[in-house]
Amino acid sequence: MGFPIDFYFRLKSVFISDSMKQDLNYGVGALITITISIGIAAIAYGGGYIPFDLSNLPAWIFGPLGVYTLLTSLFRRPEVFYNLGWSLVFLAITVISAFYKLVNMFVVIGILLIAFGVVSSIAYLKKQKKEEKT
């Protein structure tokens, strides 16, 4: 196999093993992700490594949750486009709260709407292909 395909299957086998399929559903994994993220934020803010800014707190919660949702939508595939849409929303909230001083919120919302359009178009075309086969 080539590098990208081999890398995909190796990452998939690391990300979701047979025991994880039975024991770890999305909700448990999301809760673990949020807990670890808040713990890292508490260490970073409490240790004085970065100054506390309440506006950045949603980035600590929704950023890792968006990445986790994106990975589960790509590798587990229960409802790919539904989970992909939510991961885009979480990542947009992350970008808005993390870079609110640098990036206009309406630019991020515009990019989110374009991404929703692309994801919706792909989902619609995929659904039509499936209907044509049957």
Image: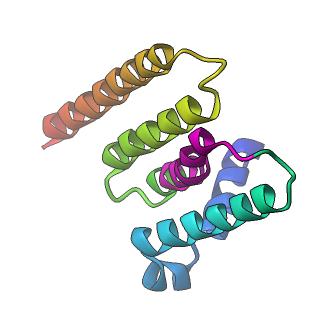
Q: Is residue 126 left or right of 51 when viewed as pictured? A: left
Q: Is residue 63 left or right of 115 when viewed as pictured? A: right
Looking at the rendered structure, the number of numbered marks drawn on it comes to: 0
Decide whether residue 61 is among the magenta residues. yes
Give whichever of 72, 48 is nearer the camera: 48
Q: Residue at x 58, y 47 (%)?
A: 63
- Quarter of the image for residue 17 reads bottom right
Q: Is residue 32 left or right of 22 when viewed as pictured? A: right
The location of residue 133, given as percent across then percent down, is 18, 39
The location of residue 1, given as percent across then percent down, is 72, 50
Q: Residue at x 33, y 29 (%)?
A: 122
- Quadrant holding the C terminus: top left
Give whichever of 123, 86 is nearer the camera: 86
- Quarter of the image for residue 33 reads bottom right
What main secondary structure does the magenta stretch of the protein show? helix
Decide whether residue 54 is among the magenta residues. yes
Q: Residue at x 29, y 24 (%)?
A: 121
Q: Residue at x 64, y 27 (%)?
A: 99
Q: How is the image coloured?
A: rainbow
Q: Is residue 8 left or right of 50 when viewed as pictured? A: left
The location of residue 65, given as percent across then percent down, is 52, 54
Q: Which residues are magenta?
A: 52-70
The location of residue 95, given as percent across then percent down, is 58, 32
